[in-house]
Image (tube, rainbow, N blue to C red):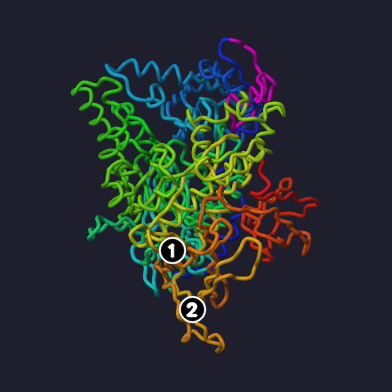
Amino acid sequence: MKKPFLLLLFFAFTTVFSQTQIRSLSEEKWEFSQSDANNWLPAEIPSVVHLDLYKNGQIPDPFYSDNEKQLQWIEEKDWIYSTTFSVSREELENQNIELIFEGLDTYAEVFLNGKPILKSENMFIAHQVDVKKILNQGQNTLVVRFESAVRKGKEKAANLPYKLPEGERVFTRKAQYQFGWDWGPRFVTCGIWKDVKLRFWNHARIENIKYEQISLHKDLAELEFTIDFYVEKTGEYVVLFYNDEVGVYDELTVRLTKGKNSIVNPYEIKNPKLWWTNGLGEQNRYEFNIALFQPKKTEKLDTKTITIGLRTIELVQEKDELGTSFYFKLNGVPVFMKGTNYIPSDSFLPRVNDSIYKQTIQAAVDANMNMLRVWGGGIYENDTFYEECDKNGILVWQDFMFACAMYPGDEDFLKSVKEEVIQNVNRLQNHPSIALWCGNNEVDEAWHNWGWQKQFGYSEQDSTQIWNDYQKVFKELIPKTLDSLLSKEKNIYWESSPSIGWGRKESLVQGDSHYWGVWWGKQPFEIYREKVGRFMSEYGFQGMPDLSTFRKIAPENELHLNSVSVKNHQKHPTGYQTIQEYMERDFPIPADFEDYIYVSQLLQAHGLQIAIEAHRQAMPYCMGTLFWQFNDCWPVTSWSAIDYYGVRKAAYYQAKRSFEPVLLSITEDENDILVYGTNDLPEAERGMLRLELLDFESNIAIWQETHNMSNEPFNKQLLVFQIKENSSNILTRIPKKMFDTFNKNKTLLKVSLFGKEKVHTTVFYFTKPKDLALTKPTIELFFLDNQTIILQSDVLAKNVFLKANDVVFDDNYFDLLPRAWKVVKLSKPVEKIEIKSLFDVR
C-alpha cells in the first residue's frame, strides 16, 4: 500500500529522537578483585578475568611457554566486578528501564545498589531485568559476583550416583573447549564476556522480527514477517514496513494490548533475486526497515532492521543402491560442500573482534569454500560471523554447544538448555547462511564406540539412565524446541555428528562421517581413497605453525622439539610422535627445527590433498568435505589450516587448490593412472586435454599425448573432452606400463585442460616426496609491481615456500616446474621475500 506522506514521515524521523534509547555500561569505569582479596584493579568490559589480570601485570602472558600450568589457580577462585554509573533525572523519567547483560560467564549473581536482581548459570544466555524502581537519580552501583565454574561443576557432579565422562565441564553451560582439548589449553574463564547496557523506552518497543518464506518462484517470493512488540498501554499503533530496493512499503494500523504482542505481515517481492553460495552466484540480500509510531503523532517509538536472503535449502537423504544419500540442495541445485570446521578464535573470547571475523571468513572465500561447520565445543558465534557468512555465500552447519561427553538430564539443566536454544535460534534463524542445526559433536558416537561403559564401570541401570538423559536433550528437547520456533523450511535438524562412528562400515554409506583412521588409527594417507562416505564432516592431520608463531611463545633457546615451550604447545598426547611417524613414511626428516616445521606443514597438506580429492572424485556418492580444522584458539601445533596469528599454513593453500571449482586430479589403481575432472559450476567446462611426462630438469616433454589434435580455431563442437556441470568423472586412463622405461624418481606427469578462458593444470609424482631425485633449483624472482611477483626456476622446485613479514601470498607452497612462470599476488608491498623449497631442507 503506497502512502507517500507516511513514507516521508518514516525517513523524517529516522534521525529524530526515538523513544527507545540504548546506553552502554561497558564504557563506564569498571574494577575487579578476587573475592577474598579486596585487591581492586581496573577492568575492561567485555572481558574475562584472565585478560584483566594480564593487562594489570598480575600474571604473565598465558600463552607464553608453559605459563598455562602456573595459571590454573585462577579457575578455582571467585571474582567480583563492580562499577558506579550515573543516571540523570531525564533518563529516570522513562516509563521502562531495563538492564541487559548479553553474556555472563558463567555462574554469576548481580546486585544493583545492593539488591540482588539476577542469577546466571549459562554463558550462552542473555539476561534483561526491569530496574526502573531500583535505580537512583545520580550514582548507582552495579556488582557482579562470579563463582568458580570448576567448583560449581564438581558440586553438581557429586549429586549423581555415577561419574559422567569429562567430569565437571558437562554440568556447566559454558564453552566446553575452555576445559582443555587436544588442540587447546585449559583456561576456564569467568567474567562479563559480552556487552552490558541500559535500555530506556516509553509506550512500546519492537522486541523481535523473524520472517518465513511461504513460497519462492522465479517471478514471485511470498514472505511473512512476524513482529513481536512490548507495549505499556493498550491502544492503536502504526507500523511502517519498508524495503528501499523493492520500493514497496506497508503501513499497518494495529491494536496492541498491554504486554507482549505479535503481528504477522505478508509481503511479496516480484522477480526475486536469489542468494547463492560462494562460486555459484551472487549473495543477493534484502534489507527491511520496520518502524513503530504512535498514531497521529510525529513520534517514533522504535525501529529495527532485518536483512534476509531468499533461497531454498534441503538436506536430501534418499535410499539408493549403495545406502542413503546425504547432500544439500540449494535453490533446487545439489551442491557439493567444500569447507572446514570452525572453532573459537581465542581462548579469551572478548579478544575476537569484528576484524578477526572478517579476515577469517574472507580466507574461507579465498580458498573456494562454501561451508563452515561451527563446532559444538565452542560458542554460538558473534552476529558478525554470521553476517559475514551471509555477505560472502558461506553456508553454516551450526552445532549446538555439546561435544565429546555425556550430559545430565535433570530439570534445571533441561530448563537452561531450552532457554539457550530459544535465544540463539531466534537470534540466528534469519541468516540465509544457516543450513543445518546439529544437536552435538560426537556424543552419540562416543557413547557407542569409546568404551565408556567399561571405563567407568557403569551398571545396566546407570547406562540406561545416562542414555535416557541423552535422549531427553537431543531427541526430545532440542528438536521439539526447534519445531516451536521454526518453519519447516528453516528446521533442518541433525541429531549428532557423526551419525555413526568411523570404525563401522555403515558410517560410509549413510549420514555424515568423521573419519579418523588417519591420525588416530595411524593408517596411511592412501586409505582416504577407500574410506569415502556420503558427507565427510571431519578428518585431518596436524601441522606445526610457522616459526614466527613459535618465536612469539618461546625463547630462542627453546626453539626445538624437546623444549618445554614447544611441548606445551602440542596438546595431543602423542602428537609429535604421530607427525614423526607419518613424516618418516613420506618425506625427508630434517634436523633443523625451521625445516622440520616446513616439512610438517607439507605433510599435513599432502594428506589433505589426498582426502579432499578422493571425496570430490566420488561425487555424487560423496557430496561434502569439511576438514578438521580451520583456525586455532591459541598458538599451537594442531590440525588448523590457519594458525592463531592468522598465518596460513601449507594446508590452507592446498585446500584452496583442491577446492577449485573446476579441478583436475589424479589417482591410481593397480593397473592404471586415472585422470579425473570435477566441476562444481552450473555449466560444463570443455577443452583440449594434454598429458605430458616431464623430466625434473627440463620443460620439454619426454612423452606427450594430446586429445583433440585439430588445428582448427577453438570451437566447442571440436572439443573431445568435457567436464559436465555439477559432476565428477574419469577423463582418461593411462596404463602404468607406459611409464616403465622412465626413471620415476625424477619424472612427473603434467595434465592440462585448455578451457575457453582458463588452463586447468595438475601434476602427479610416481614416488613419495622423500624418494624424489631433486636437484638444487635456481629460482629467479621479479617484481611486476609492488604487490605482484613472478617466479621462474631452472629445474623443478618442489613446494616453493615464500615468506615475508606480515604478508599474505595468494598462493604458496607450490611446485614450480622447469622454466614455467608463476605469478603471485601479495597483500601489501614488501622489500624482502625469502624462498625455500624441499631441496633445501637440512
Indicate whether residue 395 is drawn in magenta: no
> Quadrant where the N terminus lies?
bottom left
Q: What is the number of the mark on residue 539?
A: none
Where residue 402 appears, as percent x and y from the top left, is 38, 35
Above or below residue 197? Residue 756 is below
* Viewer-side residue, 452 vs 521: 521
Above or below residue 361? Residue 66 is above
Span colored in magenta: 37-62
Question: In the rendered view, does 732 fall on the left or right side of 449?
Answer: right
The residue located at (26%, 40%) in the rendering is: 475
State the residue position of label 1.
Answer: 673
Where residue 680 appears, as percent x and y from the top left, is 45, 66
For mark 2, give the secondary structure.
strand
Residue 141 seen by the camera: no
Where residue 293 appears, as percent x and y from the top left, is 50, 53
Above or below residue 268? Residue 341 is above
State the residue position of label 2.
Answer: 707
